[in-house]
Image (cartoon, coloured by chain):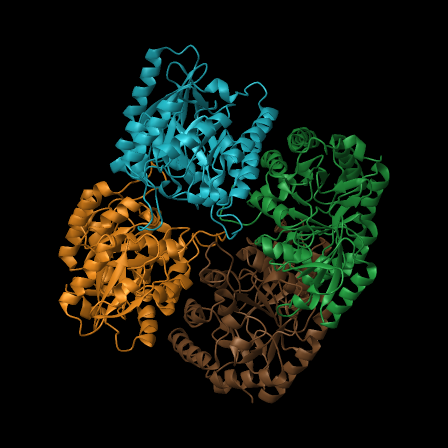
Chain colours: A orange, B brown, C green, D cyan
Amino acid sequence: MLVVMSQQATSEEIDAVVAAIQAKGYTARLIPGGERMAIGILHNKGAVDASHFLGLPGVKDVIPVTRPYKLVSREFQPEDTIIQVGDVAIGNGHLTLIAGPCAVESEAQCLNIARKVQRAGAHLFRGGAFKPRTSPYSFQGLGEQGLKILTQVREATGMPIITEALDTETFGLVEAYADVIQIGARNMQNFSLLRRAGRSQRPVLLKRGLAATIEEWLMAAEYILDGGNTQVILCERGVRTFAHHSRNTLDLSAVAVVCKESHLPVIVDPSHAAGRRDQVIPLSRAAIAVGAHGLMVEVHHAPEEALSDGAQSLYPEQFEVLCRQIQSIFDVFHPSHSVKPEETRNA
Amino acid sequence: MLVVMSQQATSEEIDAVVAAIQAKGYTARLIPGGERMAIGILHNKGAVDASHFLGLPGVKDVIPVTRPYKLVSREFQPEDTIIQVGDVAIGNGHLTLIAGPCAVESEAQCLNIARKVQRAGAHLFRGGAFKPRTSPYSFQGLGEQGLKILTQVREATGMPIITEALDTETFGLVEAYADVIQIGARNMQNFSLLRRAGRSQRPVLLKRGLAATIEEWLMAAEYILDGGNTQVILCERGVRTFAHHSRNTLDLSAVAVVCKESHLPVIVDPSHAAGRRDQVIPLSRAAIAVGAHGLMVEVHHAPEEALSDGAQSLYPEQFEVLCRQIQSIFDVFHPSHSVKPEETRNA
Amino acid sequence: MLVVMSQQATSEEIDAVVAAIQAKGYTARLIPGGERMAIGILHNKGAVDASHFLGLPGVKDVIPVTRPYKLVSREFQPEDTIIQVGDVAIGNGHLTLIAGPCAVESEAQCLNIARKVQRAGAHLFRGGAFKPRTSPYSFQGLGEQGLKILTQVREATGMPIITEALDTETFGLVEAYADVIQIGARNMQNFSLLRRAGRSQRPVLLKRGLAATIEEWLMAAEYILDGGNTQVILCERGVRTFAHHSRNTLDLSAVAVVCKESHLPVIVDPSHAAGRRDQVIPLSRAAIAVGAHGLMVEVHHAPEEALSDGAQSLYPEQFEVLCRQIQSIFDVFHPSHSVKPEETRNA
Amino acid sequence: MLVVMSQQATSEEIDAVVAAIQAKGYTARLIPGGERMAIGILHNKGAVDASHFLGLPGVKDVIPVTRPYKLVSREFQPEDTIIQVGDVAIGNGHLTLIAGPCAVESEAQCLNIARKVQRAGAHLFRGGAFKPRTSPYSFQGLGEQGLKILTQVREATGMPIITEALDTETFGLVEAYADVIQIGARNMQNFSLLRRAGRSQRPVLLKRGLAATIEEWLMAAEYILDGGNTQVILCERGVRTFAHHSRNTLDLSAVAVVCKESHLPVIVDPSHAAGRRDQVIPLSRAAIAVGAHGLMVEVHHAPEEALSDGAQSLYPEQFEVLCRQIQSIFDVFHPSHSVKPEETRNA
């Protein structure tokens, strides 16, 4: 349920509506819009009776919310969310490119790759310090040492950094170093981690689970927003199907649906979807064409020597090609918004 | 196995190799290339011994074929196949748009839609006369009357027509009227129908089955080529997965893989993939961006009254938007090939 | 819609209701029950007004049918269908075992296997004469010669035979030789073949398609019943999923659902589901335990030399183990119905 | 790599082999067998050279391990693992029944259900105190209060209790109350949680993820065993597919594969697989018939009032029917092992 206040509503009237909502045992959440305030009603058990609020002073309308997700829905907030990370804006007409290696391996490796992807057009640098691995015997990442390397990259290039937090124990550590915190596909329904992310000041990139429906994905984001953190970037990375010519099946209709259902920015990770280098550029073009707000792409200066996921990492010169091609496609749809990579870098 | 002749090989030498292949009980298939002849060896049971042919006069090389599909593979034919339908070229840098209603309902309906999609940029007109329906109680199409209406559209507009053949009994009838014959997703492994299509002079559009792997799809095309018909257009139309926000999950990585594995043109049907009108334009953009050679889109002048699949049919004015957007994307990748719709129409 | 006649209804009253249904442009289908006649209304476009029929003499009730499938539903016929093939009864408490090689290879092979599976407890003999093959270059079956071999098996052992019809062209040929005609998974929505099967006097075994929903499967059966052939045996054989430890994922909940929704017998093919010999016996036990009316199992006397699907074929001695184990499980649920293999054989 | 010691090997020889393994930088893990000791080599990067160990005194053989999972594999331990929980044995010929409500709601509810399922034959009592919920607005469980209620059930009935641990924060709390700790499907690759479970003294029930391959599932168990906890019970609970007649598709071939690949006990949860009460009994029968070592079933005294998952919970009298049917099936395969419920209870 959403209580829409009139444009002329005073802050006293707003406070009175909040108090009336709380008196019923619900949670009231202020949702400022461009021209007027709305107040979301959350944590109600069972249906809410609109008549309780319709007659209150300053109330223009009471709108039932038809979706199980509330805060992430366009019903609660029609306007696109834009997330600001340093000089980089994500969402609503901005094209955001995130690039870097799968895993942080060394300072030299990261700086080498970072300079190359930045030159090509990347806005954020990615690299895993804590790696979720299927096998307990695989390389698990450099941990805090990896986080320190990432901050060196940020200092050297000016690019904000994004890296994954695997669990609540190390979340605070990651938060202390990273500009954007990634929650991986396998953790999409790790609700404790989502609640922890909800208490963070950092933007969170939330990957879609391998077998997650759109509703489950948006509900996972809802956990974060319900915790108080409204800066969530969704990331489609392919789902698991019978098809095995790519590691996962990139579901681009999900991008179209999410853009319609939610105000949150949504980007695409073609590298994990494909699992094969030769599909990354075509899928990147398709992702931008379908309307994604950006890409997260794995790039390695020597993929054949990478400690993880080398087979899907682009060579830096391929990433340059990718940037040129997607910028052209993006310009077709967003002529006014088109942001040249040079202008968004502060290095 | 592929026997590659030298550029200087005489026709007598070629004949001698063919005879040597046949003497072993295999089938020889001539595969003319740009500069030299190759001879494919088919229908061998077990491995072929290259030494039988390597020493013959005029033989430059004998190349093992690693794929289970032969004639459709780039190993057999590295150059893109271009299929000519009247004035329309399909494949290799041409952008082909097929549009029309799901089912042929009446002459007035078809002419109305045809004129609108032609004006917007469509090259071929689609419409079902024989409809495959899940229920025996649903509208099954107008049959031959529908085929006649399609030819009236061709006469009136000059657009070649494409329509589905459901079975071997009515294949000849469809062949007599249509310019391109469609084999639907449910029939992708109807091997008798594929063999019948292999004996046709008409180009065949072969849709991917709902749960078909790339290999099965290419093998289905191989049936048609093995029958003697080399004019096959592949059509990705979504696969069945757990996801239900779209009717099927459009698998655009399949387009990338097929373009790499096969010389045949591949187009995308976003309408059946989505099953929802609001996803058709975004998925069309993505399909062209990933590298598809064209689209087949359902358009209806009054979708809410359509006898089948109205929910996924575009309004004509939406199809105009679609054409503008995809042309711009296509131009990004194929600057020299870009064919304006006007130039390809003979109406 | 189902018009239920009273027990006392005369044949004149029944005729009058049929006439009234036909006068509305619908099809009337008599559905004799244990104690009274019902009349199904088919081929209506749009809703049927019950009041047209409620007042007619002899009419006890008019029941709306909520499912898209009619003739196959328990709404139309609550009692289990039993299909009689020679001395073998299929459905409703009978346990039916079908066994034999994937493909008919020779008379000696078939007789050898047939004698062994019969001794172990099989009631019907299976073997493919026309084989649907993914590749045009694979062994396609012996054709009519294979059918003749099957009849020799029937003569020698008394076991009825079941074999696949691939297309309408060869359906009549198969019908002339076989006791039960199989329609394969890839042909489940080959509607022309289904209509042809609907005109046959032979029982039809209809396999579930690789990606078919229960509704699509039952609708495919509805095509056959709508054509006039009520003898349909459904066969679950696994669906295609992301899982690759078995060739397909056997969906045993489908058996439970179909038994609830439909009166038709349903059996399970564990061989094609598993694609691996070592899973066939456990899955067979599970299929009987879930409530299937029988099994169709591939058995070969020398699987390693089989012309197709050897890897999933049981050795005859394994089939003996299977028969013993499933009989014990079946007896748990059907103490009174338990039919000893010996009693059902006429050899 | 597995170093197999001869039967006569002394403890000094075993120590020397361990030391030799550690000297190479690997981890040595003692794996006592029925008649002789084996020593597993773990955490090697790259291949291990067998010749380092083959010549050492007391070494009988060095066996390469072909699977990515080690400690859970039958290569490392051929004999079935039996897990003892109080008087209840799980695995290797014992039939274990776990039953109870989805969520702990009150002491009265739990005691009511517990007495009924115990009388019917259940060996362990299940109930969720911490509930993983798709929506942040759904009932999240009673937390520690729920754990206390579970211990009251244990005191009153003597049945060991199993309940889920959602995260590392609350793992210790759950561990303090529960006899068996469940890790849910969504957490199957929550590697921090798996590592925490690896340090626990309690048996762990590890559910298969919704889209997990067998290898991923066994690797998740490997995390727990690698941490030192060898008491892992695997639980198949259905995977996500296109099929929607059941909530998930129960994959019983997975049970057959896991029993072949691993020595760990594997049980089945038909309630979450089906999501519908009417499929639970048939699927339970199938699970036991395929070879599962037990079942975990949701039972509620008043399912229509349950706070979660009521639609899939059995009525107590249905659970009685289930127990009778599966015991009969189990007896068919395990005549000597058959354990009457009465004998295993200490109440």
**Front-lying residue, B189 or D335:** D335
User: Is D305 left, or right, of C206 in this rendering?
Assistant: left
* Image label count: 0
**Front-lying residue, B307 or C200:** B307
Image location (x, y in percent) of residue A57: 20, 69
User: Is A45 left, or right, of B309 in this rendering?
Assistant: left
**Residue at x 27% of width, y 62% of height:** A52
Image location (x, y in percent) of residue A332: 34, 76
Q: In which quarter of the image is the C terminus of chain C?
A: top right
Find residue C313 and report its image quarter. top right
Q: Is residue D319 above or below residue D9?
A: below
User: Is B189 left, or right, of D1 in this rendering?
Assistant: right
Image location (x, y in percent) of residue C117: 74, 34
Q: Quadrant of the N terminus of chain C?
A: bottom right
Let me know if residue D263 appears in the view.
no
**Front-lying residue, B256 or C260:** C260
**Front-lying residue, D264 or D296:** D296
Image location (x, y in percent) of residue B211: 55, 56
Q: Is residue A290 above or below residue C292?
A: below
User: Is B135 left, or right, of D186 in this rendering?
Assistant: right
Find residue B184 and report its image quarter. bottom right
